[in-house]
Image (tube, helix red, strand yellow):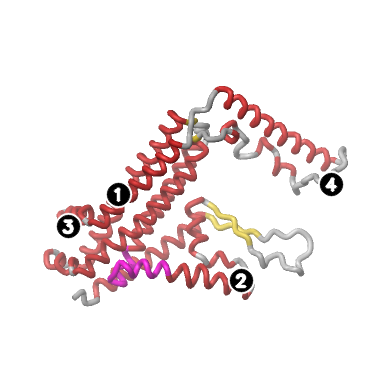
Amino acid sequence: MNLVRAELERLAARRFVQLMVVLLAAAFAVTVVTTLAGSHRPSPAELSRAQAQAAESVREMEMTYDRCLRIREGSLPPAENDYLPRDCAQIDPAQLDELPTAADYLSGVFVFAKEAEPLLYFLIAFLTLFGFLVGASYIGADLNSGGVVNLLLWRPRRSTVLAAKLGTLLGGLLGLSVLASVAYLGAFWLIGQASGLVGRTGGDFWPSLAAIWGRGLVLVLLAAALGFAVATLGRLTSAALGAVAAYLVVWELGARLVFQILQVGRPDRYMLSSYLAAWLSGEVRLWDGNACGPGISGYCDGSYTVTWPSGLVVLLGLTGALVAAAFTVFRRRDLM
């Protein structure tokens, strides 16, 4: 317990961590102030006009669906510019997840229900970067400066010391992420109340937002553990940054180009970014440009889906392997 408390104090006292927290707060403040300055409370006339436009859009969708049914039944001849899906149920307004609302036709008005999801993705992206950098610098600086050696003189158990550092990092980051999320989304909810609209927050709005937030927290912790592990293996903070840069250039860009030249089927399934996006969004639909070649006749669907369980398995497997390697190397190598 004393070791964890000491590590928590060391983590909070690091200037880089303090600087990153300040930058995190500054980024949030700029986003909130910018949103507040660009929003206003809609007048009754604006609301009435937007509601009329939304109702008209819904009526047009219903008319398009009814026309599709009549054409499929043969009671109405199709026009040249008619769009006919394979199944008219695809354009049935009653089966859509979300119909047009007045918020879609309001200009210069912040609507919390409409903007909460992209704002949450921005928060997760920033916290993920924050976690990776803090995780890499936390262990990298101690290994480079000899701080770990001094700590081992007090507690001469390498695995215990490294586990305490990693656990303290993840616990502190989790607490900060929860507080930042509450403050961040709470600020925008207040903006919607005072200088905009809250919008429709019923149904599955909050459960869906909570699911994204939960997956985002897992991603933040995995990014921190990944940065921690790579910096431990390389003994430098820059090792983690170099590894990420090398992966992006060599694999995400270089290998993707090679796969395209060789016409490899479904190349995105070999990219970590695909599984990261699938985990964060729940599901990602990708397109295989080689599936529908010149020799294919008739209808061809070159799309395929990667779901969040696959993304979680890949992310956990990669992070777990690197963390295990970091602990193995840390126990055996010379730290002087």
Does residue 239 lie above or below 167 as drawn?
A: below
Which label sits on residue 260? 2
Does residue 279 lie above or below 120 as drawn?
A: below
Left or right: residue 284 versus residue 162 is: right
Q: Residue at x 49, y 71 (%)?
A: 251
Give the crowd class for mark 1: few <14, some 14-19, many >=20 residues within 10 Å.
few
Q: Amino acid at mark 2?
A: Gln
Q: Residues under labels 4 and 3: Cα distance? A: 75 Å
- Residue 202 inside the magenta-drawn segment: no
Residue 92, image x and y in percent?
70, 38
Q: Quadrant of residue 104?
A: top right
Tag 3 secondary structure = helix
Q: Residue at x 86, y 39 (%)?
A: 76
Name the residue tied to disc 3.
Answer: 3
Q: Amino acid at mark 1?
A: Val
Residue 173, image x and y in percent?
31, 51
In the rendered structure, are the residues bearing label 4 and label 1 in contact, judged by CB atoms less than 8 Å apart? no
Q: Residues under labels 3 and 1: Cα distance? A: 27 Å
Q: Amino acid at mark 4?
A: Glu
Q: Which span of residues is magenta-colored?
A: 228-245
Nearer-N-terminus badge (2/1): 1
Q: Residues under labels 4 and 1: Cα distance? A: 59 Å
Residue 319, image x and y in percent?
38, 63
Q: Residues under labels 2 and 3: Cα distance? A: 51 Å
Name the residue tied to disc 4.
Answer: 80
Q: Closer to us: mark 3 or mark 1? A: 1
